[in-house]
Image (cartoon, rainbow, N blue to C red):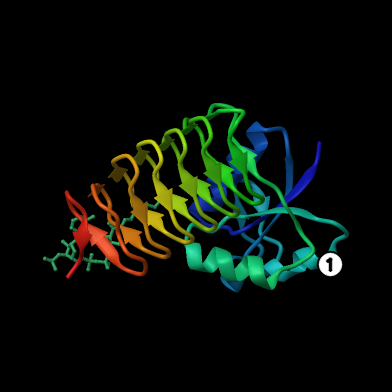
């Protein structure tokens, strides 16, 4: 059984821990930069200190368990020398042709279809579906229950809110936020927030 550190003690951390446990990993320690959490427990595991503590270990394996894309990126840049593992819940269906980058998690009930690519430190959350030939960039978060049709591209750091959808072949620009329940029917530029059906920039 391999020991894995979980960096992040919030609700998303709980789901990462559950995913790792389902895969047979041993989560020995949870770390979080919020000192109010130190000494508390998450899913029965003690929060032992700030995230940088992981660097005191030799060749540690870890997952950044923070749902906010920009925060995940900052942590990944700050903390080097870690084996960022990817974790696919046993109940998720991920086609063998799918490439998955380091630090990426795929939660329970998600489906990822052939020839899609998942970048690093991405999140395919509970029950989300990613159809064939999608390109999911680094630090992307696809929230629970999202549905991406074939050949959708989500550029780095973009966020698909809960239950949002995208028709085939559309692209969401880098660091764009798509609101809960939105439907993307044409390309969205980077750095905006878009809501509704069809998804349009929020005022
Ligand atoms: C889109 C979103 C990011 C906007 O958040 P925000 O910047 O705090 O915006 P506000 O809540 O102040 O809302 C601003 C306006 O947009 C509207 N709006 C917000 N979210 C919306 C949505 N998903 N669909 C349609 N309209 C929405 C609000 O009604 C409000 O309209 P008004 O100005 O006419 O009253 C957020 O509402 C959202 O959908 N987040 C998704 C969260 C999620 O899925 N999390 C999953 C975690 S696993």
Any atom of ligand 1 within 8 Å of the CB at mark 1?
Answer: no
Total count of labels:
1
Instruction: Give how far across and how far down residue 104 sits, in percent.
Output: 59, 48
Q: Secondary structure at mark 1?
A: helix
* Residue at 80% over, 67% down: 55
Left or right, 106 with reference to 55: left
* Residue at 56% over, 52% down: 13
Left or right, 122 with reference to 27: left
Q: Quadrant of the N terminus?
A: top right
Q: Camera-side residue: 186 or 47?
A: 186
In the image, farthest residue toward the right:
58
Q: Is residue 40 above or below residue 163?
A: below
Instruction: Give how far across and how far down residue 103 sits, in percent.
Output: 64, 51
Q: Is residue 33 above or below residue 121?
A: below
Quarter of the image where one finds residue 90: top right
Instruction: Give how far across and how far down residue 21 sits, in percent.
Output: 66, 36
Q: Quadrant of the C terminus?
A: bottom left
* Residue at 36% over, 53% down: 171
Quarter of the image where one finds residue 144: top left
Q: Residues within 10 Å of mark 1 (few under 14, many from 20)?
A: few
Left or right, 78 with reference to 188: right
Mark 1 sits on what residue? Answer: 56
């Amino acid at each position: 059984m391999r020991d894995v550190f979980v960096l992040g003690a919030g609700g998303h951390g709980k789901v990462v821990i559950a995913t790792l446990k389902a895969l047979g990993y041993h989560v020995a320690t949870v770390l979080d930069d919020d000192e109010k959490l130190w000494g508390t427990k998450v899913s029965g595991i003690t929060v032992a200190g700030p995230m940088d503590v992981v660097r005191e270990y030799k060749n540690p394996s870890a997952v950044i368990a923070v749902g906010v894309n920009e925060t995940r990126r900052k942590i990944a840049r700050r903390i080097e020398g870690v084996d960022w593992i990817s974790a696919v819940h046993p109940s998720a269906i991920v086609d063998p042709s799918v490439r998955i980058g380091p630090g990426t998690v795929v939660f329970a009930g998600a489906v990822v279809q052939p020839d899609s690519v998942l970048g690093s430190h991405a999140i395919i959350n509970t029950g989300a579906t990613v159809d064939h030939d999608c390109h999911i960039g680094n630090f992307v978060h696809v929230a629970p229950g999202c549905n991406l049709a074939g050949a959708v591209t989500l550029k780095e750091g973009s966020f698909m809110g809960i239950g949002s959808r995208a028709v085939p072949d559309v692209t969401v620009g880098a660091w764009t936020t798509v609101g809960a329940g939105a439907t993307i029917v044409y390309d969205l530029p980077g750095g905006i927030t878009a809501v509704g059906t069809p998804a349009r920039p929020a005022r």
